[in-house]
Amino acid sequence: MNLPQDITSRVQRDFPQESGTVLSRLLQLRRDSEAFSSDRLLRCLVHAAHGDSSRIEPLIELGHQDSRDLIVAAECNAEWEHIRDMNQPFTE
């Protein structure tokens, strides 16, 4: 089971020193967790971590508790306005 190229590229860009570890964790999540089987949730996780690998596990826990919270963290701004759609591939 592979990750989409846009997610792999974003992880390599945002986590240059830890990209292998982060990618392995995402693959494990995709394989073992129904909640993280969607590309959208994986993109939300990567985006919400903001390049900080110490945020990955807390965000995974958030996604397991209620995936909508992770979606809001990644797709909305501080005023709760929907400003991005993580159903779409990363473009940069």
Image (tube, rainbow, N blue to C red):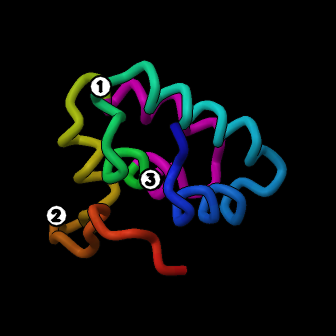
User: Where are the magenta residues, as a range?
Assistant: 45-63
> What amino acid is found at the position of numbered circle 2 in the picture?
Trp
Q: Residues within 10 Å of mark 1 (few under 14, many from 20)?
A: few
Q: Give the number of the disc on residue 14.
A: none
Question: Where 13 sits versus 1, above or below?
Answer: below
User: Is residue 7 a member of the stretch shown in magenta?
Assistant: no
Residue shown at 17% from the left, 70% from the top: 82
Task: Using the image as rendered, state which of residue 66 and residue 91 is in the foreground.
Answer: 91
Assign the magenta stretch its main secondary structure: helix
Q: Quadrant of residue 5?
A: bottom right
Position of residue 69 in the picture relative to residue 42 (left or right): left
Residue shown at 28% from the left, 72% from the top: 84
Position of residue 90 in the picture relative to residue 71 (left or right): right
Q: Which residue is mark 3?
A: 48
> What amino acid is found at the position of numbered circle 3 in the picture?
Ala
Label 3 sits on a secondary structure element that is helix
> What amino acid is found at the position of numbered circle 1 in the picture?
Glu
Residue shown at 44% from the left, 32% from the top: 30
Question: Where 51 sits versus 6, above or below?
Answer: above
**Discs 1, 3 touching: Cβ within 8 Å:** no
**First reached walking from the N terminus: tag 1 or tag 2:** 1
Q: Which residue is mark 1?
A: 34
Spatial separation of the CA atoms under disc 1 and disc 2:
26 Å
Q: Which residue is mark 2?
A: 80
Label 2 sits on a secondary structure element that is loop
